[in-house]
Amino acid sequence: MGQLYRIVLVFCAVFQLAACAGTSAIESQSRLRDSRLARMYFLREQGVLGALGGAAPAAEIRVDGKPVGSVTNGSYIFVDRPPGLLKLSVRNGISLAFETETRVEAGGTYYFNIGVPKTGAPGMDLLNQAYAGGSGQQMRAQSPLSAGFSGAVLYSLDPTAGAAEIARLKPG
């Protein structure tokens, strides 16, 4: 019984430390726009959880396997990349990473919202979205395992909705 208690205690401590991590960007967030590159915004809506002062664990973002930063509730980061097919991934806490691909064009602006996976049950999806965010079109996972065991997924937002959401959030 003592061994189980210690394991549960360590798990809770690790989860709490993961939740404390804030938004951070590895790349400069004051960089001028280069028309030869695509700009990709990664954002996380505040949701009810953030509005009540809570924080979900920071979601770690990778582009083509390289970390670009992490995002918490009510914030965003951006990265600039050359045009082409890019592999995106998001990992939240201790769950598996959600991996997907997207094609970007030079001079384009793309918005990716980090949210909870859709379950297929409409009532539960609405509740999850209100609680933790996740509007937009859920992107397709590269593997069923990635889709089924990820704590966070990426949603693609149209440019108008993405720009409006960025205006409400704080930069990373």
Image (cartoon, rainbow, N blue to C red):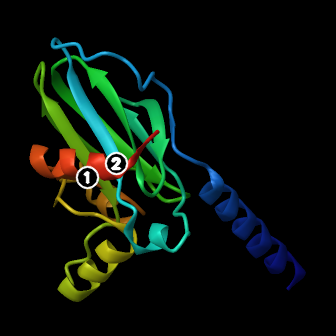
Residue tagged by mark 2?
43
Quadrant in the picture for residue 152: bottom left
Residue positioned 30% across, 67% down in the render: 117
Q: Residue most toward the right?
A: 2
Q: Tell me, yes or no, if residue 32 can be seen here.
A: yes
Image-based side of 42 in relation to 25, left or right: left
Q: Position of residue 29 (x, y in %)?
A: 42, 26
Residue positioned 89% across, 81% down in the render: 2
Image-based side of 134 in relation to 170, left or right: left
**Dot 1: element:** helix
Q: Position of residue 124 (x, y in %)?
A: 28, 84
Q: Tell me, yes or no, if residue 158 can be seen here.
A: no
Viewer-nearest residue: 27 or 86: 27
Q: Which quadrant is the N terminus positioned in?
A: bottom right
Image-based side of 59 in relation to 41, left or right: right
Residue tagged by mark 1?
165
Viewer-nearest residue: 133 or 142: 133
Image height of 167 relative to 126, above or below: above
Q: Residues within 10 Å of mark 2 (few under 14, many from 20)?
A: many
**Which dot, 2 or 1, sits closer to the camera?**
1
Image height of 170 relative to 2, above or below: above
Q: Position of residue 10 (x, y in %)?
A: 77, 66
Image height of 30 relative to 117, above or below: above
Residue positioned 61% across, 59% down in the render: 19
**Dot 2: element:** strand
Residue positioned 37% across, 50% down in the render: 169
Q: Amino acid at mark 1?
A: Glu
Q: Residue most toward the front?
A: 167
Q: Amino acid at mark 2?
A: Leu
Question: Tags 2 and 1 in contact by the CB under 8 Å rule?
Answer: yes
